[in-house]
Amino acid sequence: MNAEAEKYRALDLKYGAQNYAPLPVVLRRGKGVFVWDIDGRRYFDMLSAYSAMNQGHNHPKIAAAAKAQMGKLTLTSRAFYNDLLGPFLMRLCELTGQDKAILMNSGAEAVETAIKAMRLWGYRKKSIPAGQAEIIVCEGNFHGRTTTIVGFSSDPDSYEDFAPATPGFKKIPYGSQEALETAITPNTCGFLVEPIQGEAGVVIPPTGYLKKARELCAKNNVLFCADEIQTGLGRCGKMFCLDYEGIRPDLIILGKALSGGFYPISAVCSRQDVLGLFRPGTHGSTFGANPLACAIGQAALDVIIKEKLPAKAAQIGEYFKTGLARLKHQKIKEVRGKGLLLALEFSSKARPFCEILLKNGVLAKDTHHSTVRFAPPLIITSRQIDQVLDLIEQALAEF
Ligand SMILES: *Cc1c(COP(=O)(O)O)cnc(C)c1O
């Protein structure tokens, strides 16, 4: 890094909590699949802010919607109605096939909302004795960073020094229907699961697992709750990753790309008999469901639908995966993924490889030591994929 970049890094080191380990690049501008650093050097963004930028950086339609709404009304609080919330809730319900939606800001808040909704349903509809509701989660999960959520993480860095954990969660191996069947008790109100574990390193469960788990939940009167914050909205080659198994969850959690990368917005969509249980005073958020978020969310969905991003992710993802699978290197153990949520698994640490990629003009981040995730904006073209594959091949030669 040059002197100016070092200056920005030094400020971060001095004044910022060091809860991330960024690659040594300071960005200033973004457009489509590209970002530029402070020296005007261009990079392919193969992370898309952890899939929050499926529509690409600075999409002109979403930017226009945001700017227009900024000149009108940005925040009312939920003490009053606003003219954008109702239509946006309807859109979310139609898109997910659910009866009701509730809006929050970050993904973690939406997960917290789903946890509260499942417990509420457990007490009111399933007559679970007070304080006894259990939620089943999976090993290797990532659902966010709040105290309750990290309490059921299996990553020691996430939970160890943040104890005590919130009770009421039971952890089972991901991908095992037997484990789910065994874990369910009369006090189980919900099963919270990612269709693909993104943060764990793009871990794909066995085919048919999600369908079977969904059936087990239905049979045992347990709510099946899909966290599609990362896998949803086109990323995996369908609107929702669960569409691959043709199932509809009882609750679906959305976030990330619902924002178009502009402004945090998240949602939980579910049935009337679940979300219909909330009463005034039982849940809320000052910024949740504000008109600016609704305007941006509508535009973000418009782009995903009008530009057919799920189908693009399926087609380009297949092309990219085939290209990655052709790469030859002694350290490559596996290439896996669905749509444009792909991973390259090495037999050694992946961070040095990401540093070489950075030097070559490709931004990608290692997860869990030996995995590199490739999740570009879904607007990426096959020609651009060819360029990225060339740059990856050059990086491999140096690795
Ligand atoms: C990113 C993510 C979250 C948390 O979202 P935040 O907006 O960072 O709070 C939750 N679940 C999954 C599957 C995610 O990928």
Image (cartoon, grey):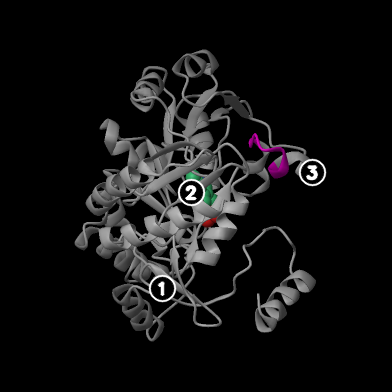
Q: Dot 2: few (<14), some (14–19), or many (≥20) neighbours within 10 Å?
A: many
Q: Which of the two labelled residues, at mark 3 and mark 1, occupies the earlier sequence position?
A: 3
Give the x, y percent position of residue 89. 32, 57
From the viewer's perspective, is 66 left or right of 160? left
Of residues 332 and 31, the one nearer the viewer is 332
- Depth check: give the residue in front, 42 or 85: 42
Q: Residue 298: percent from the left, percent from the top?
A: 31, 65
* Residue at position x 38%, y 27% in the image: 210
Taking the magenta stretch, the answer to whether it contains residue 342 is no
Q: Which residues are magenta?
A: 152-158
The quarter holding residue 304 reads: bottom left
- Residue 130: give x, y in percent of width and height: 61, 28
Which residue position holds label 1? 292
* Residue beneath disc 2: 373
Identify the residue at horizontal 30%, vertical 68% (top origin): 299
Q: Residues within 10 Å of mark 3 (few under 14, many from 20)?
A: few
* Left or right for 334, reference 143: left
Q: Earlier in the sequence, mark 1 or mark 2?
A: 1
Foreground pick, 338 / 15? 338
Q: Residue furthest bottom?
A: 71
Q: Secondary structure at mark 1?
A: helix
Which circle, 3 or 1, is nearer the viewer? 3
Residue 273 disc label: none
Residue topped by disc 3: 161
Residue type at numbered disc 3:
Asp
Q: Is residue 143 above or below residue 37?
A: above
Q: Amino acid at mark 2?
A: Arg
Q: Amino acid at mark 1?
A: Leu
Residue shown at 33% from the left, 37% from the top: 242
Q: CA distance from mark 3 to mark 1?
A: 37 Å
